[in-house]
Amino acid sequence: DARRDEAPSTTDSRDSPESSCLPGPSTCPWKHGTALVEPYPGGNLHGKHPAICSNGCTLTSLRDEPPRRKLLREAIEFQELFHHEAGSPEAIKAARVREVELEIEQHGAYTHTMEELQFGVRVAWRNAPKCVNRHQWQDIEAIDCRHVETNQEMFDAIVSHIKEATSGGTVRPRCSLFKPVVPEVLDKDQSAGPCIWNS
């Protein structure tokens, strides 16, 4: 979200685009992390002002960033934001970050907790600048469908989602999350993973 709220001016040299490419704690009070130019040029959203907040966060490009490094950076930035907004003790955050680092090192991916998924869904909606309904971001509920294995189970989950989201004629924001494609599978089959074909 392009917040311009007042916050403590705690910027230092690590706020530069070059250093923000590196995994590590964000010095921005809002924990924005790295704001990327691709795939949508930031100028379309921020006009002539490249800063996305009053604390020096700027748009940057990481076009040549290796995939594993990109995953690790994004995972750490997500954990920084999650624990910052949750008010977690530093020890809890550090332990979770270490778990994530080890899982990425061993498997090339990591598994979100349900709390992280719920938070991620809400922040994604909160940070969607072109959505007129994003002010309801705190109301959206994540539905964990990562256990789904078959086409029938996926169909049943989608039907359940529709019924729950439209129950009683009042639309309730919901987001069903299916199992992600892990790197090992994606390397073998580019079409692997849950897909919904619209006719």
Image: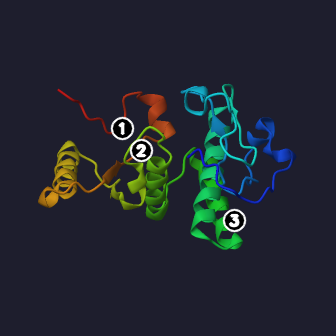
The mark nearer the N terminus, 3 or 1, is 3
Q: Find the distance from the CA under tag 2 to the CA under tag 3.
A: 25 Å
Name the disc covering residue 94, or none: 3
Is disc 2 surrounded by few (<14), some (14 to 19) or many (20+) residues within 10 Å? Answer: few
Q: Quadrant of the C terminus?
A: top left
Please indicate whether residue 55 sits to the left or right of residue 133 in the image: right
Of 137 and 187, nearer the camera is 137
Where's residue 155, x and y in %?
Answer: 18, 45
Q: Residue at x 38, y 56 (%)?
A: 136
Where's residue 167, x and y in %?
Answer: 15, 59
Of 135 and 80, nearer the camera is 135
Q: Residue at x 74, y 49 (%)?
A: 55
The mark nearer the N terminus, 2 or 1, is 2
Name the disc covering residue 193, or none: 1
Q: Find the distance from the CA under tag 3 to the CA under tag 1.
A: 31 Å
Are circles 3 and 1 on residues that touch, CB within 8 Å?
no
Return the residue at label 2. Answer: 180
Of 125 and 23, nearer the camera is 125
Amino acid marked by disc 1: Gly
- Residue at disc 3, secondary structure: helix
- Residue at disc 1, secondary structure: loop
Are circles 2 and 1 on residues that touch, CB within 8 Å?
yes
Q: Is residue 103 above or below residue 39?
A: below
Amino acid marked by disc 3: Ala
Q: Quadrant of residue 9?
A: bottom right
Name the disc covering residue 18, or none: none
